[in-house]
Image (cartoon, rainbow, N blue to C red):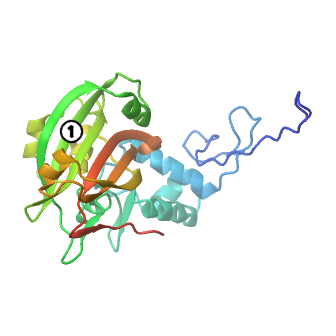
Amino acid sequence: MLDGNRGFVVKSLVMSSTPTNLTSNGAPGAGAGISASGSSPTFSPLYQQIKALITQSLQSGEWKPGELIPSEVELANRFKVSQGTVRKAIDELAAENLVVRRQGKGTFVATHHEARAQYRFLRLMPDTGEPHYPDNKILEVKRLRAPAEVARLLDIKSGDSVIFIKRVQSFDGAPTIIEELWLPGVIFKGLTVERLVEYKGPMYGLFETEFGTRMIRAAEKIRAVSADEGTAEILKVEQNTPLLSVERVSYTYGDKPVEVRRGLYLTDRHHYQNDLS
């Protein structure tokens, strides 16, 4: 139809993975893929609707990190769809690292405590030798009001409570990464420097276990910078040494941002590795 400027108005079709018309037992019903208002049709393949339902169960905690989820046959019966549809949904969830298939054992909810998961978000790899997790030294933990830019990235109000963490990560005794993190205060209430120091696993494992927050994906911006005086002192390098600056926003289920992380990486003996697929 025409708008007031005599141009054509085209209503776009929204691609959605969220089923909108379900039967009482949770299975897709007649008309699934049509929005609640009925005015804006959505075209979502059946396996995408099943994927969304399984994701909802992961988000609600029906199956905890590390737990075995029901078999494809059981899920097919539950949702009243074919086993092939369930398999395709789980294939996508596995590709997104939400679940892990184990030959002969079944499919498990992914967890940050698995060795393979610890390197998913740690992208700095040694030029020689085997990858290994760095030693952490916590420099500062405090609760403060969110700066405007951090609030925008976390999708909270400017001035809302956040937990600020500053730490140094060292490989084989050599300081290599300086990181500053901002976490929503409401979600991470009770996070203290003592708990961070005594916890020996990956930080994301702590967030998952004690705060019920699992990092699903992250978006990063990377640029080259020079070490200022304070950074050079911490990393034990000359001022103006080249560094990588990495800003990361991490998201949990529902694409909710739950962490802003800004890091400075020394790459004289390491490189930043990103696998594209």
Q: Where is residue 76 drawn, in percent x and y? A: 52, 58
From the viewer's perspective, tell me whether residue 116 is left or right of residue 83.
left
CA neighbours of label 1 inside 10 A, class few (<14), some (14 to 19), many (20+): many
From the viewer's perspective, tell me whether residue 93 is left or right of residue 85.
left
Q: Residue furthest top?
A: 159
Q: Which quadrant does the N terminus fall into?
A: top right
In which quarter of the view is residue 108 placed? Answer: bottom left
Question: Which residue sits at x=40%, y=35%?
Answer: 154
- Depth check: 189 or 74 in front? 189
- For disc 1, the marked residue is 165
Label 1 secondary element: strand
- Depth check: 43 or 250 in front? 250
Question: Which residue sits at x=11%, y=39%?
Answer: 195
Q: Where is residue 126 drawn, in percent x and y? A: 22, 71
Q: Where is residue 206 drawn, in percent x and y? A: 20, 46
Question: Which residue sits at x=40%, y=45%?
Answer: 251
From the viewer's perspective, tell me whether residue 150 is left or right of residue 131.
right
Is residue 190 in sight in this rendering?
A: no
Q: Give amino acid for label 1.
A: Ile
Is residue 6 in sight in this rendering?
A: yes
In which quarter of the view is residue 36 placed? Answer: top right
Q: How many marks are shown on the rendered structure?
A: 1
Q: Where is residue 186 drawn, in percent x and y? A: 30, 27
Question: Which residue sits at x=24%, y=32%?
Answer: 163
From the viewer's perspective, tell me whether residue 258 is left or right of residue 243.
right
